Amino acid sequence: LRTINYGISNNVPKASKLLLDVITYVYECSEQEASRISVRVVADNPDETQPEVPVFNTLMVLLGFDCILVRCKPVQGTDVSTGVVRASPFYTRIISQVSTGDKEIGLRYRDMLLSILEWFIRLDHENQSKSL
C-alpha cells in the first residue's frame, strides 16, 4: 500500500493529465487529439458492440470522475442498460482505509490502476516493459 499514489486519485486535474498521457502514448497522438479519440468496442455478442466510444471521457466517468455525460448504445442487462456510462462500482469501491497522518482516506481500486499507469508512463521509452 505504500507505493500507491493517493494524490492522483483525489486530484481530478492530475488524474485527467495522467489518462491523457497514457492515451497519447498508446495512440501516438497529441494530448489535444487524445481527448477526442474514439474507438469501436467489439463484444462477443454483436448486439453489445459499442461504436464510437470516447476513450478519455469514458475512462474519467468509469473511474468515478463525473466530468461529462457519456452516451452509449443501451444494452439490456449490462451496466450501460440506460444508454449512459456510469462510474464503475469495481473501480470506485473502497478496499482499504489508509492513514495519511491527520486523516484517514479510502483506498479505491482506481488508486491502484492510476498508480500502475503512472509507473508505466514514467518509464524510459527504451525500457522493455514499455513495449506494446
Image (spheres, rainbow, N blue to C red):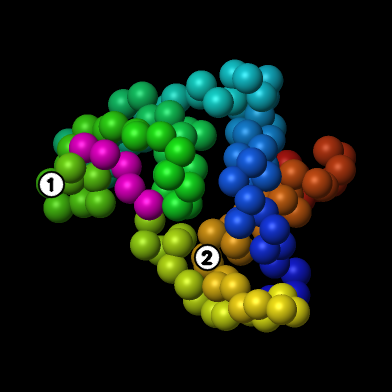
User: Who is closer to the viewer here, 96 or 10?
Assistant: 10
- The residue shown at (36%, 24%) is 52
Q: Which residue is mark 1?
A: 76
Q: Which residue is mark 2?
A: 109
* Picture coordinates of residue 44, whole percent (x, y): 26, 44
Secondary structure under tag 1 reads: loop
- The residue shown at (80%, 46%) is 122
Question: Amino acid under label 1?
Answer: Gln
Secondary structure under tag 2 reads: helix
User: Who is closer to the viewer here, 128 or 97?
Assistant: 97
- The residue shown at (70%, 58%) is 7
* Picture coordinates of residue 113, whole percent (x, y): 59, 58
Total number of numbered discs in the rendering: 2
Can see residue 85? yes
- Estimate how packed mark 2 is, as few (under 14), some (14 to 19) or many (20 or more) residues with alpha carbons within 10 Å: some
Q: Is residue 85 a member of the stretch shown in magenta?
A: yes
Which stretch is magenta? Answer: 83-87
* Picture coordinates of residue 39, whole percent (x, y): 43, 27
Within the image, what quadrant is residue 23 found in? top right
Direction from residue 15 to residue 73 in the image, left or right? left
Q: Is residue 112 a member of the stretch shown in magenta?
A: no
Direction from residue 100 to residue 56 in the image, left or right? left
Q: Nearer the viewer, mark 2 or mark 1?
A: 2
